[in-house]
Image (spheres, helix red, strand yellow):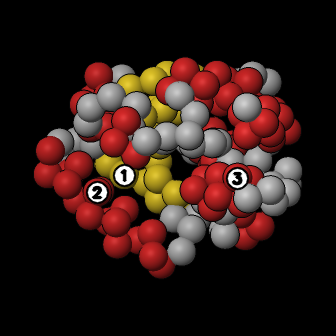
Amino acid sequence: MKLLLYPGTFDPVTEGHVDLMRRGLNLSDRVLVAVADSKSKDPFFSLEERVAMIREVTREMKNIDVEPFSGLVVNLARARNAGAILRGLRAVSDFEYEFQMALMNRQLDQEVETMFLMPSARYTYLSASMIRDVAQMGGDVSTMVPPEVHKRLRKKLAT
């Protein structure tokens, strides 16, 4: 497979996300991390900040590209000629939503496949929203996010 598209909000990027990026590279020649605008989710970090964080975290990982996007994931997949969309499944609760999304994407474009990967066991409990909540309440999330992201979280919370 030439290109694997890994879309998400990544607010912030977690160790679980990075785990899936690395494992995606084992399955494809390139991984495009597509950072969703997601204005409707009222993200903690701006789109520019999220893109910058992922670029910083993946700077030493060959064959990973990062770009912002808005609109339908299937349109981006088609435009970039992606072999598949990569989605992570942490728990059964993720499955129903991700399954519906995969079926909708297939309805919109039958050529675009969705590939599900479970994160490594040590990351199955992680979610960006939980990390944000814990960090905002003063909890230590340093083992849950890359060091660069932890630094940015602390800085943003201090302002």
Give above or below for 121 relative to 73. below
- The residue type indicated by label 1 comes to Thr
- The residue type indicated by label 3 comes to Gln
**Foreground disc of the pair 3, 2:** 3
- Check the image and name the residue furthest to the bottom: 92
CA separation in Å, label 1 and label 2: 9 Å
**Foreground disc of the pair 1, 3:** 3
| Label 3 sits on residue | 136
| Marked residue nearer the N-terminal end (1 or 3) | 1
CA separation in Å, label 1 and label 3: 33 Å
Residue 74 image position (x, y, % from top left)? 27, 38
| Label 1 sits on residue | 114
| Label 2 sits on residue | 101
Which quarter of the rendering shows the C terminus? top right
Q: Left or right: where does residue 37 sit relative to residue 63?
A: left
Residue drawn at x 60%, y 53% as measured from the top left: 128
Could you say which is closer to the camera, residue 34 or residue 117?
34
